[in-house]
Amino acid sequence: MNKSIRNRAFTGTALALAASAVLTACGGDDGSSADAKAENAPSTKAVAVKDPLVATFDGGLYVLDGESLKLADTIELPGFNRVNPAGDDSHVVVSTDAGFRVLNAAEQTFTGVEYKGAKPGHVVRHADKTVLFTDGTGEVTVFDPDDLAGGEKPQGRTYTSAEPHHGVAIELSNGELLSTLGTEEKRTGALVLDKNNKELQRNEKCPGVHGEAAAKGEAVGIGCEDGILIYKDGKFTKIDAPDDYGRIGNQSGSDVSPILLGDYKTDPEAELERPTRISLINTETAKLRLVDLGTSYSFRSLGRGPRGEALVLGTNGTLHVIDPETGKVDKKIPVVGEWQEPLDWQQARPTLFVRDNTAYVSEPGTRKLHAVDIESGEKVTSVTLPKSTNELSGVVADH
């Protein structure tokens, strides 16, 4: 196994749990036939896991060992659930229909820490802080992920947006809080608050604002329908798209690269646009480059490697490793079979999750999960799970 996959051990006892109300969602094949049993079924008693991964399926969560991909435990949790790293060595944040819940993935048990609210949305990790944005209330919650270790709810900063909306927020190392502006009908830009939640400045020239990512030098980008808005060194800079409608709604950043990776869509009337071009945004020069990969991808296809490599999982089944400085595709790694992005964003599709030098890729159509060494391009290991998965994430310590 690649040595870059960390090898921390955790101990703990798993608790069985069934919680939250059902939120209708489609998760692909249910794997219910007799021949669809996993080649890797968990034992009746959950065991401690190393660098845990967490994958969602229709009705629950799988917790897997990050090195062997062995299925350690299955946690029942009805409904459509989302999962993100909490920012430490053992926890992930699970978004349910009732709010955010904290799962100790290492011990395979929910901690009891909850942040209730309708439509829990983005989870952002930056500068040793984790920020939750609840779309249904517009509430922003900031906490230190290290404070989750005791199992108690961390004491953290809060801010409530003027109006609820599908938004996102990020706290910078100097204590400034950048949060989006909008309503349920319209999103326009972002504002920046000081440590006391006093507004410092705002920019409302970012229609349809969506998503965020941080680059080297703590340059933060938020996507617009006509380009991207950058906040750096205390000021906003708008980088226009080359098209009148050039939407960058999903971004991925790296603290070792000044260049952000983004998607790029140009058809505002499309029921679902399947773009083949990605955007590379240089936060130092305020320049935007488009790269045509010759294959489409989805919002769960973007990631960054340990050296800042831009990673895109294409619908041709290939993981594209791109030099962000030049836009050149340096490597094409076959990982899964060909696939097509479903119309419903909640439906399962191959998903990319990156940690250190390993790219984890799910393949819902075959119920498989793969681990790929980014540097060598080698598929290190693969497993088959009892049911097809939807979202894929895991623990990621920011320090």
Image (cartoon, rainbow, N blue to C red):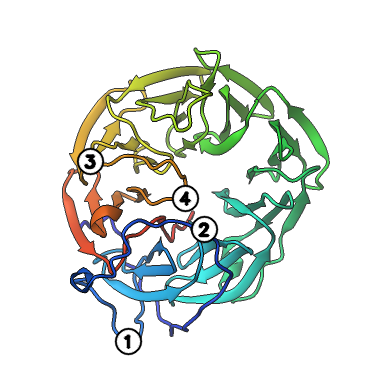
**Can residue 70 be seen?**
yes
Q: Nearer the viewer, mark 1 or mark 2?
A: 1
Q: Dot 3 surroundings within 10 Å: few (below 14), some, or many (20 or more)?
A: few
Rendered position, 116 above or below 140: below
Quadrant of the rendered structure where residue 75 is? bottom left
Percent coordinates x, y for residue 343 in the rendering: 43, 40
Q: Nearer the viewer, mark 1 or mark 4?
A: 4
Of the image marks 2 and 4, the number of the one nearer the N terminus: 2
Are circles 3 and 1 on residues that touch, CB within 8 Å? Answer: no
Mark identifier at residue 261: none
Residue drawn at 22 percent across, 49 percent down: 373
Q: Which residue is mark 3?
A: 338
Left or right, 177 with reference to 362: right
Rendered position, 317 above or below 13: above
Mark identifier at residue 346: 4
Of the image marks 4 and 3, the number of the one nearer the N terminus: 3
CA distance separating discs 3 and 2: 33 Å
Of the image marks 3 and 1, the number of the one nearer the N terminus: 1
